[in-house]
Image (cartoon, helix red, strand yellow):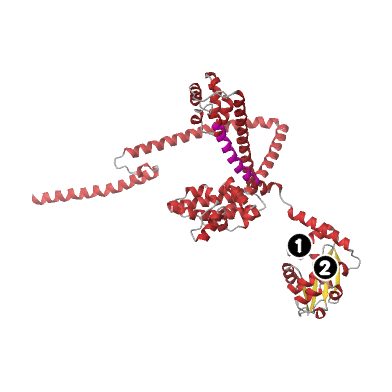
Amino acid sequence: MALYLLFESASGYGLFHAYGIDEIGQSVEAVRSSVLDLDRFGKAVKLTAFNPFSSAVDALNQCNAISEGIMTDELRSFLELNLPKPKEGKKAKYSLGVVEPKVGSHISEVTGIPCQSNEFVQELLRGVRLHFDRFINELKDSDLEKAQLGLGHSYSRAKVKFNVNRVDNMVIQAIFLLDTLDKDINSFSMRVREWFSWHFPELVKIVNDNYLYAKLAKFILNKSDLAEKDIPALADIVGDEDKAKEIVEAAKASMGQDLSPVDLINVQQFAQRVMNLSEYRKNLYEYLVTKMNDIAPNLTSLIGEVVGARLISHAGSLSNLAKCAASTLQILGAEKALFRALKTRGNTPKYGLIFHSSFIGRASTKNKGRMARYLANKCSIASRIDCYSEASTSVFGQKLREQVEERLEFYDKGVAPRKNLDVMKAAIDSMVNGTSMDDDDNQKTDASAKKSKKKKTKAEADGDAMDVDKPSNVADGEAEPGTEKKKKKKHKLEEAQEENGAAHANGDAEETETPKKKKKKSREVLEEAEPKTATEGKKKKKKKAKAEDDE
């Protein structure tokens, strides 16, 4: 069976015929040894056809298609023109050797050409790549290098292209900086407390917050200068007038030592630095929240901004987190404990960074492991939706959060949760309805704007018609209070009926019903009363007859 080789170069497609394989040997080792020798390799392989690319854009499109395992129309026409056509109803007496197995399978599915991609074919194509410029006389070595370099740059640029608003690297850097700032602010705040406590030790017991303490240290500076006139300013800082008075009283009877003006200035400057750091930390947290809502809205709505950012930073990127299995995501951050448990054959950890979620804290002790496993499953779903969906929406994250809440209730109270299929269908429906509602609102606003324009033109044209219509509007306005009066009368009648029903000793609820039911009841009472009177009359007649017989 004849063997043809398809070679994709930076300048075009090349088709080679391996006609002299017997001369170099049919084993992989024989081909490998003959590849370096052009005279020997040239006797086994020859060029059949070459189709150059029309432009750099065409070369990039063809390269992208090959990398994705797709056969383009240009490649199909090239193969059908240059490969021998088999007879109708018979199989081809040749096979096509390709580098990429995916491309070969696609070619065989569409065109029916038998393709193969094995180690033998790979070695032959390696020799073709090595001596490609020698097979084509008009192609220079420098031209081929330029084409390869240009295609390599354009292909890399196309692959690296991304949405600027969805850069997860910014989230990774922000969460690292946030953790570092937390540590630094805590240590600096403790230093401010220790430093200023030499001068005003009673302030530590009155104010517990680090930021407020630094603010007060900057404002007070010297405790001996504090007076009752400073109470309003202190109340603005602390937020409590009683606490401000307490600070002033403590300053009057303070046991701290006096500091020189230079020392007080240094304390003031350091307190200002701590305040600036804490304010920057707040701004950084707001930046992290906005970035997480842009990059991973579903993961953010499910587990929170900070925990979601920690998961992304620990995995390396959002795509790496999406590739993680739920069991891997569950123990992210607990690698040391995992390997220690595997080494000592102890119990493996149940959770890693996920432990910081509020759901794990709310679960009971025996259900924490179950909750961590379930939450990791939902986090992996949310991260995959965020990574691979084109439209950014938080609907799925909200639905997944509802599922986790239902699972918590199931563990605590035994309430059966909804199925995942139903929840996902509801999320998709809400997404579709949301988009359709937006479109409908836009259409309604356009229609209302057009109608208002038409009304204005009519009003300008027919001013008298508007005057005629006014009495009808007034009549309509007068009719409305009448209806309200009728409603009030009905309401009073219903209240009176309810009061009458409550006054009865039997407390029958049927008496408070509509008047029709009362009529039925009265008929039934009359019917019951009539037979009683008839029996009483018969009894009286019988007594009279007995009395006459006795006489």
The image quadrant of residue 327 is bottom right
Quadrant for the N terminus, please.
Answer: bottom right
246 horizontally vs 285: left or right: left
Prevailing SS of the magenta stretch: helix
Using the image, determine if residue 12 lies above or below residue 178. below
- Looking at the rendered structure, the kind of residue marked 1 is Ala
Q: Tell me, yes or no, whether the highlighted magenta stretch contains residue 174.
A: yes
Q: Nearer the viewer, residue 58 or 498?
A: 58
Give how far apart the Cα atoms at labels 1 and 2 are: 23 Å
Which stretch did the figure color magenta? 173-194
Q: Tell me, yes or no, whether the highlighted magenta stretch contains residue 484.
A: no
Q: Which residue is mark 2?
A: 130
Q: Nearer the viewer, residue 240 or 179?
A: 179
Q: Are marks 1 and 2 in contact (CB under 8 Å)?
A: no
Is any part of residue 470 visible from this angle? yes
Q: Which residue is mark 1?
A: 65
Please tell me which residue is depicted at 81% across the width and 75% down the height of the picture: 34
Q: Position of residue 178 (x, y in %)?
A: 61, 42
Please tell me which residue is depicted at 53% across the width and 48% down the height of the picture: 357
Q: Nearer the viewer, residue 159 or 94?
A: 159
296 horizontally vs 510: left or right: right
Q: Position of residue 107 (x, y in %)?
A: 75, 70
Q: Position of residue 153 (x, y in %)?
A: 80, 55
